[in-house]
Each structure stands twice: as C-alpha cells, then as structure tokens.
Image (cartoon, grey):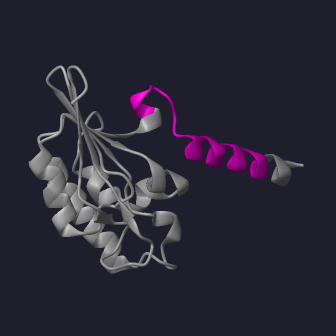
Amino acid sequence: KYGGTTLKFSKPLFHGLEFDRLGWVLMLTVEHGGVKVVHSSDLQGPVIEDYAELIIAERPDILILDGPPTYLFGYTLNRINLARSIENAKRIVEESGARVIIYDHHLLRDKLYRKRLEDLYASVPPTKLMTAAEWLGEQPLILKIALEEEASRGRARAS
C-alpha cells in the first residue's frame, strides 16, 4: 500500500499455455479511490480457464487484457486454444463486473483480430470491449496501417 493506492501482484502465472517454456508473468491489481484496475499482463488470452477465474474474482472496474496472439494463428496458436481464449473472454465479460475491458498487446499485432474474435465482439457492447487506442478515442494503429496498405495497393493498381 502506498498512500491511498494499493498494489497487488499475483503469484507467478504461465506466460500463455500450461507448462509452456516461455516462462512466467505477474498480474497486477491497482486500487485507488474506490476504482480497481487489473492488468492481466501476458496471459495470452487468457487461454487458461483458471486465470479467467482469477480475473473474475478480482472484480475489476477496468481490465487491461492482452488477448490471444492471433498473429501467430496456425503457428503457435491453434483453433482449440483460440476458442479457449474466446470462451474465457466471454466469461470475463459476463462475470467480472468490469465496466470496460481494454484489449492491448498481442491482439493488436494482427489486422484480422476483430474477424478472429467476431463471436466475442458480436456479444459485447462496443463501449465495454475496446482497444487501448479506442479508449483514447483513436483508431488502432494496426487498422490504420492496414487501411494505408490497401489504399497504396489501390493506387498501384490504378496506375
């Protein structure tokens, strides 16, 4: 506890899948002025159901969630673990009580992130699930880049 702010760190959690050799990460809960913010760190989804339970049990007002590494789909992320991450995210949305969930980190490395998570996005109001950029009133950088690439290809075809 530091003045009116409480910091709480989780026990070491797997960096992604169970028993993966990527190592460990810590989840951080910050509480100040009656508002609780949880930063899930690098849980890659969370893909692990027990970690979804930890997040739900924290009852955050604001949750910063890294999301599944969809840019690695077909390489280190398979359909089963993507589905686990989506189901865990749905549970977190429904049961955590969070006013807003901010996606950041892994998910925002893939211009197809919304398509890959369309079931989740379809079930949640846009004011409750957004990216860090959207929280700040901006368009996610990965989408800006994708639009610029598409415009550039269109100009190249036209010339």
Report x, y in % for residue 64: 33, 43
Residue 27 seen in the figure: yes
Q: Could you tell whether 37 is left or right of 150 in the image?
A: left
Q: Residue furthest right?
A: 159
Residue 111 seen in the figure: no
Q: Main secondary structure of the magenta part?
A: helix
Asked whether residue 1 is drawn in magenta, I would say no
**In terms of image quadrants, where is residue 8?**
top left
Between residues 43 and 133, which one lies in front from this camera angle?
43
Taking the spot 20% from the left edge, 20% from the top edge, the residue there is 4
- Vertical order, 111 against 137 (above or below): below
Q: Residue furthest front?
A: 2
Taking the spot 31% from the left edge, 50% from the top edge, the residue there is 40
Q: Which residues are magenta?
A: 134-154
**In terms of image quadrants, where is residue 126?**
top left
Report x, y in % for residue 6: 21, 31
- Vertical order, 144 against 16 (above or below): above
- Vertical order, 145 against 22 (above or below): above
Report x, y in % for residue 94: 12, 49
Taking the spot 47% from the left edge, 56% from the top edge, the residue there is 106
Taking the spot 23% from the left edge, 53% from the top edge, the residue there is 10
